Image (cartoon, helix red, strand yellow):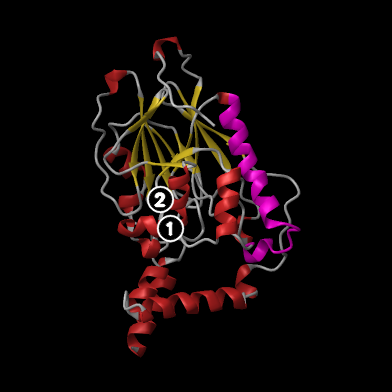
């Protein structure tokens, strides 16, 4: 476990790693459809998590996660206990998957909050900076307002923005992604920070042409058919505010040959139906609003989302 401390930055080499960066772990009890041939999904997940822990120990620095620690906010106790035992202690913001019905107000009903209660996660609250060793972290959970850095850079601490929101660049986006979410637009808005990490967009990339460096961490694990050739990365924040990445692609992964779209999973369909029914039964949300919530994830193509909502409105 990393113990928070303060260090004289003048004695630290600019290239020294001061934080390990990640997001979108999407830890799950059941294997995703295209990983169901794994002998043990927990063992497969551990391979990824082990590298995260190793890098934190080797560099004697904290781990920072930009959201979606769990694939669902109501993960079962077995997975929560496993995550508590296997994850490194880390600073994090919640992503939409960590929040009940995407609501930050209800965070204390989530699996994410259980890890906060046990001390495995140190929650980065909105507008409440946290400093550990050589980096001051500014948390922006899913759905919160983004604001300039409130701390002057001259204080020698690296000012890191930790954001769960969609960020894209060419080739790492869904069709029709808005210009407001393009990395160049984000850089203008976040120019007062020394470094920035994003979670949400599963297509990772590192933008270093200008300061601040911006890392969209991408998916932490290969879970889907279209991620089979994807190379997950872990970010490294350096004492001068630069960000670099290292590969996190374990050997021996087992995938099904059939793409997701050709093998619908009855269990997943049932789970979705039950979740929609629960929302309706509890009076929290109507059916159209529920569809809007479930298709809000930016992994759903804009054209598909619009078609689903249009069809539902015609029927209801």
Q: Earlier in the sequence, mark 2 or mark 1?
A: 2
Q: Is 167 contained in the magenta span? A: no
According to the picture, the residue beneath numbered tag 1 turns out to be 110
Q: Is residue 227 visible?
A: yes
Q: Is residue 196 above or below residue 296?
A: above
Gap in angstroms between the C-alphas marked 2 and 1? 10 Å
Residue sitting at x 69%, y 68% = 258
Q: Position of residue 198 (x, y in %)?
A: 41, 44
Looking at the image, the residue that sits furthest to the front is 118
On the rendered structure, is 24 left or right of 130? right
Looking at the image, the residue that sits furthest to the bottom is 315
Q: Is residue 177 visible?
A: no
Q: Residues within 10 Å of mark 1 (few under 14, many from 20)?
A: many
According to the picture, the residue beneath numbered tag 2 turns out to be 94
Q: Residues within 10 Å of mark 2 (few under 14, many from 20)?
A: many
The residue closer to the viewer here, 46 or 17, is 46
Q: Position of residue 45 (x, y in %)?
A: 64, 50
The stretch of residues the image draws in magenta is 31-58
Q: Position of residue 122 (x, y in %)?
A: 42, 40
Q: Position of residue 229 (x, y in %)?
A: 65, 52
Quarter the N terminus occupies: top right
| Image quadrant where residue 57 sits | top right
Cβ–Cβ under 8 Å for marks 2 and 1:
yes
Q: Is residue 3 above or below residue 162?
A: above
Element marked by disc 2: loop
């Amino acid at each position: 476990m990393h113990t928070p401390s303060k260090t004289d930055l003048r004695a630290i080499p600019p290239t020294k790693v001061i934080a390990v960066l990640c997001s979108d772990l999407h830890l799950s009890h059941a294997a995703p459809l295209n990983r169901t041939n794994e002998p043990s999904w927990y063992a497969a997940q551990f391979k990824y998590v082990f590298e995260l822990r190793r890098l934190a120990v080797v560099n004697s620095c904290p781990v920072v996660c930009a959201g979606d620690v769990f694939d669902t906010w109501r993960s079962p106790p077995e997975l929560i206990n496993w995550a508590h035992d296997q994850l490194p202690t880390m600073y994090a913001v919640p992503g939409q998957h960590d929040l009940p019905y995407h609501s930050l107000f209800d965070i204390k009903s989530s699996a994410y909050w259980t890890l906060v209660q046990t001390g495995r996660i140190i929650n980065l609250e909105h507008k409440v900076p946290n400093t550990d060793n050589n980096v001051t972290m500014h948390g922006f959970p899913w759905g919160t307002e983004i604001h300039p850095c409130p701390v002057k850079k001259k204080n020698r601490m690296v000012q890191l923005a930790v954001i769960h929101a969609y960020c894209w660049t060419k080739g790492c986006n869904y069709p029709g992604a808005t210009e407001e979410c393009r990395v160049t637009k984000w850089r203008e808005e976040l120019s007062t920070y020394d470094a920035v990490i994003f979670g949400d967009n599963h297509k990772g990339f590192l933008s270093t042409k200008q300061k601040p460096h911006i890392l969209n961490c991408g998916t932490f694990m290969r879970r889907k058919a279209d991620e089979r050739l994807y190379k997950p990365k872990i970010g490294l924040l350096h004492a001068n505010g630069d960000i670099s990445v290292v590969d996190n692609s374990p050997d021996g992964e087992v995938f099904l040959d059939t793409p997701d779209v050709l093998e619908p999973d009855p269990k997943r369909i049932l789970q979705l139906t039950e979740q929609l029914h629960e929302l309706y039964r509890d009076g929290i949300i109507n059916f159209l609003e529920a569809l809007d919530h479930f298709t809000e994830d930016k992994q759903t193509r804009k054209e598909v989302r619009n078609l689903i909502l249009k069809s539902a409105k015609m029927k209801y």
